[in-house]
Image: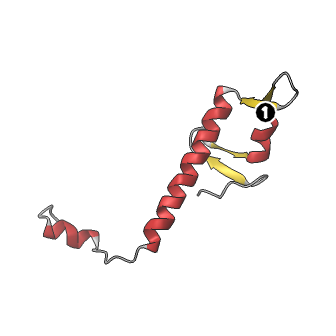
Amino acid sequence: MTLIAESGVEVYSSIARRKTSVAEILEKVKFVINPSGKKSGVMVDLDIWEQIVGMLEDLEDAEEVKRARAVREESVPWNTAKKELNLGE
């Protein structure tokens, strides 16, 4: 199950295969500060980056499923499709 990622909400990371909260990930982020003292970049360990990418992929997949469910098209049961395509029963 994929949950929408919001601060403090647990999300399932398909790469790490464990639940990680966004808050836990944010604690491990390191900011790069420019000479004028402003944040100008972010550094994260590779395992954290992979968790972030996994979360983004999960969110993208969830949005795709949501869009697909919104389209009201006629569906054909798998067994009927197999028969019509001569794929056996």
State left or right for residue 30 relative to residue 78. Answer: right
Say if 65 sits above or below 43 in the image.
below
Residue under the image location 65 percent in, 58 percent down: 4
Residue designated by label 1: 28
Task: Spot the residue most to the right.
Answer: 37
Residue under the image location 64 percent in, 40 percent down: 52
Quadrant of the image occupied by residue 17: top right
State left or right for residue 66 relative to residue 17. Answer: left
Q: Nearer the viewer, residue 41 or 55?
A: 41
User: SS class of the residue under badge 1?
Assistant: loop
Q: Nearer the viewer, residue 18 or 70?
A: 70
State left or right for residue 59 relative to residue 11. Answer: left
Screen quadrant of the C terminus: bottom left
Where does the image place residue 28, in percent across and percent down from the top left? 78, 33
Where does the image place residue 37, in percent across and percent down from the top left? 88, 27
How many other residues sit within 10 Å of disc 1, few (<14), some (14-19) or many (≥20)?
few
Task: Spot the residue most to the front.
Answer: 36
Q: Nearer the viewer, residue 59 or 11?
A: 59
State left or right for residue 70 relative to residue 19. Answer: left
Say if 10 sits above or below 36 in the image.
below
Where does the image place residue 83, in percent across and percent down from the top left? 15, 69
Quadrant of the image occupied by residue 23: top right
Say if 70 sits above or below 34 in the image.
below
The coloring applied to the image is: secondary structure
Residue under the image location 61 percent in, 46 percent down: 55
Screen quadrant of the N terminus: bottom right
Looking at the rendered structure, the kind of residue marked 1 is Lys
Residue under the image location 64 percent in, 33 percent down: 49
